[in-house]
Amino acid sequence: MDSVVLGVPSWVLVVATAAVVLLTGAAVLVHDSRRASAPAGAAQAAVRHATLTAVVALLPLGAVPAVAVAGVLRSWRLPVGHVLVAVPSACLAVFLLLHAVGESTWPRPSGAVREASLTHRTVADVAPAALRHLAWSWAGLLVASCTAFALVADGPRTVARLTGGTEAFVAAPFPGWLWGLPAVSSGLAAGALAVLVLRLVAARPAVPGVTAAWDMWLRRRVARRVLRATQLVLGLTTALVLQVAGSALERLGLGAGYGGWTAALSTPHVVAGRVLLTAALVVLATSVVAALWPARDRVPDAVPGRVVDAAPDGVPA
């Protein structure tokens, strides 16, 4: 039976969490698009298309906080850990696929006379460097940590230490290969999709009738949203793996087992566990701050000769 928290069924809290995240993100995106400097015609259509794509792509990301709340309440039968660790990356993959569809259906020039600006652009041109480096850093840390934990693990999901000549103390769950394989494979697959979407953003036709600077501003705006979500989910996955490993190593060092069985204190294991728990908090906080930190680009107006300040773009999508 579903539990009740403060008189409210837990499923209501889970659904409400997802709804609040989605509605807040959609409201910020729509409000921000209305403040963008865009003349009538193709520029306004481009802003509307980018906003609609971002709003629709938010839908799968709403599942991430909902699953987190369900895990905290411990009232839902969630998938086992090695499946759950791949859920954020799976939601990110759907988010990126929706963005890819949006980039592939970009409004084309129309009318009797059509124009198209042919300029070679790369991912580095459209994607903010800081967010790119942060996303790759989380991906690298995820691969490195999962590889190290798989080598240290005593089994697919356990870690152990000898407490005597033939006795061993075991702690679980621990992100051995049973956790590491789905975490790394799903994370890298989502990262590859992010690169594909950024290539689509760089390669799509320019918006007709606007300056090259305004067109580049819109591309960077879309690329920033893609990278915010990518680094956030990769950071959350990395933090989850570090937290599980840190908790297991701390319990292993403290020697407190089930059924009242205890073992001698192992200070190195306790210190290693707490270092990993601290690292998990740092990764989590950094990824969340990077996703929400407002960016103020100077938006070149589509009409040459005017420059206006951009509205803060602090959207997590």
Image: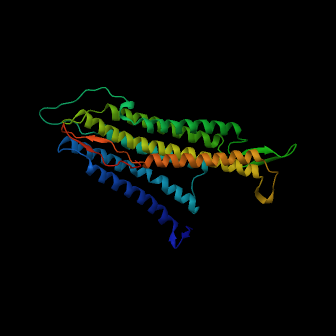
- Residue 270 coordinates in the image, percent (x, y): 73, 48
Which residue appears farthest toward the bottom when viewing the image?
Answer: 7
One can see residue 148 in this view: yes
Q: Is residue 236 above or below residue 103?
A: below
Q: Which residue is drawn at 36% across and 31% down?
A: 125
- Is 220 positioned to the left or the right of 91 in the image? left
Q: Write down the quadrant of residue 309 in the picture.
A: top left
Colour pattern of the rendering = rainbow
| Viewer-proximal residue among 115 and 283 | 283
- Residue 234 coordinates in the image, percent (x, y): 51, 43
Q: Write down the quadrant of residue 202 in the picture.
A: top left
| Viewer-proximal residue among 60 and 308 | 308
- Is 317 positioned to the left or the right of 161 in the image? left
One can see residue 193 in this view: no
Quarter placement of the N terminus = bottom right
- Residue 294 coordinates in the image, percent (x, y): 39, 48
- Is 152 positioned to the left or the right of 168 in the image? left
